[in-house]
Image (cartoon, helix red, strand yellow):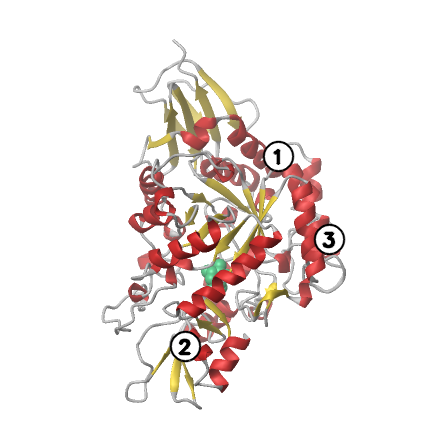
Amino acid sequence: MTSQRQWWHSSTIYQIYPRSFCDSGSKGHGDIKGITSRLDYLKQLGIGTVWLCPIYRSPQIDNGYDISDYYQIEPAYGTMADFDELLRRCHSLGLRLIMDIVINHTSTEHPWFQKALKEPDSPERDFYIWQEGIDGKPPTNWQSKFGGSAWQYDEASKQYYLHLFAKEQADLNWENPKLREQVCDVMRFWAKKGVDGFRLDVINLISKDQRFPQETESGPQQDGRRFYTDGPRVHEFLQEANREVFTPFKLMTVGEMSSTTLEQCQRYSDPDSHELSMVFNFHHLKVDYPGGDKWQLAQCDLISLKAIFAHWQQGLHNVGWNALFWCNHDQPRIVSRFGCDGPHRVFSAKMLGTALHMMQGTPFIYQGEEIGMTNPKFKHLEQYQDVETHNIYRLKQSQGTCHQDLMAVIGDRSRDNSRTPMQWDETPNAGFTRGTPWLDVAENFPEINVKRALEDPDSVFYHYQKLIQLRRDYPIITEGDYQDLCPEDPKSWCYLRQYQEQKLLVINNFSANPIDWQLPQSLPQTGWQLVCANYPGSPEPSSAMTLRPYESLVFLNNGEK
Ligand code: GLC
């Protein structure tokens, strides 16, 4: 890679899910004015950039990931004037704003799709992917990521269209150059407004194998994805978008990469490839999916987790760039997942934050993570709103899984776990809305909320604030290499970062019990300075020490002789 430092190498990004962030009124769902009203809080946290999940006009089948007009703001969220004001306020506070852009598919209510449907001879027909069925069956056996066939039949034209997600999200045909021009126009429109970049939704799925082969292998991941993941023309398409939009407008881009590989991500994020600034991959969030199946319960496999991070940290070092994240709007809360949302909640939330933020890459914080929000543990199916959750429930039930087992797995895995309203204070509905929230607030809001976190100097909030600051203070965090010191240890995660003469030692106890820890002989035995800890009164590293439950320690050694 041609190494040139960019602003996003040392910035921390905060993800806002508008529907659940802050309602400026009593609508029951968040809005743009609500976000603007909370920017001072984000500034206090210390983040440099806001990632805004989709706020475009949308029928909201998938909470905005089904866009029906790329040029309009969803009326439920406000107006274009509200958006302009949000952007202006961000910039005046020194915050950058990146938009989520969904260009693998549109809503079936998008005028392009409507025209494609009603006027099969129109140019818009070819903006989507249509195929003939085979013997009364869909063209291929590919499965939608939300369950069921990935093809939907259109009675009028007797053809099927492809939808890798809900049937209301029709996949765009990137083979069509006119479509690609339209997509670039959309991105140019927002770039001209002054947005600082894009998060590109499932961007590695845009190029489909035009032979549309049948899936012949079996298993939870064998659903046809190999025929459209990191597909034949994806790099070419991204280079085109980069040439047309990203480079001319100096945008930062982060691509969401579904089921990808390190080799592909090296290409996507190598500055010399002229594609994207960085990549999200999800391998580390599948270490509790037995055999790759999200809908089966299992514990976090720490050894695999560490191996995956080592692979990506080392594989992208001096090649491309990682996006670091534990949480987003599609994942359960990390403290409930890999930590402890009971008595050790605060320690484990801080430990998880440290383990992630001390690596190389750009950290992303998902709203509420910075106060240690948990999964809500809903008791009733009706409390869930997510289209994926309900699709999977119906599918698994029809295959014979009982209600109780389904509730247990959904309670752990549903995307609504992270979508519950942001917990601002202890007033009704956690101060999120004066109306009835669209999704129930987690019951623990009187204890876990922003107001309390700000009042408590030992809160998760101030720990995250410190982590963000450390990245600004110590170039070793941005620049250093990565070495796992105990890859086979099932309970602790200790790694070393090295940059020039400096060493950064990051020690994390991933268990609820005390564990013994030895400073490796290969490391200097003196000269370590503590830069971050999650317990008060933390020690110097000594050759043998006991780590308390979920303890986390970061030491710096300047290597002075
Ligand atoms: C991405 C989004 C997710 C959405 C899907 C389809 O994975 O993060 O929320 O459902 O793409 O757009």
Which mark is first along the chain, 2 or 3? 2
Q: Amino acid at mark 2?
A: Asp
Q: Residue furthest bottom?
A: 156
- Residue to which mark 1 is pinned: 462
Mark positioned earlier in the residue sequence (2 or 1): 2
Residue at the far top: name it: 561
Quadrant of residue 461 within the rendered picture: top right
Residue 344 or 58: which is nearer the viewer? 58
Q: Secondary structure at mark 1?
A: helix
Give whichever of discs 1 and 3 has the lower sequence position. 3
- Residue 503, quarter of the rendered image: top left
Front-lying residue, 16 or 377:
16
Res 1 quadrant in image: top left
Q: Label 3, label 2: how many angstroms apart (C-alpha)? A: 47 Å
Does any portion of residue 255 appear in the rendered image? Answer: yes
Mark 2: secondary structure: helix
What is the CA distance from the residue labelled 1 to the residue labelled 3? Answer: 21 Å
Q: Are marks 2 and 1 in contact (CB under 8 Å)?
A: no
Q: Residues within 10 Å of mark 2 (few under 14, many from 20)?
A: many
Nearest to the eye among marks 3 and 2: give it.
2
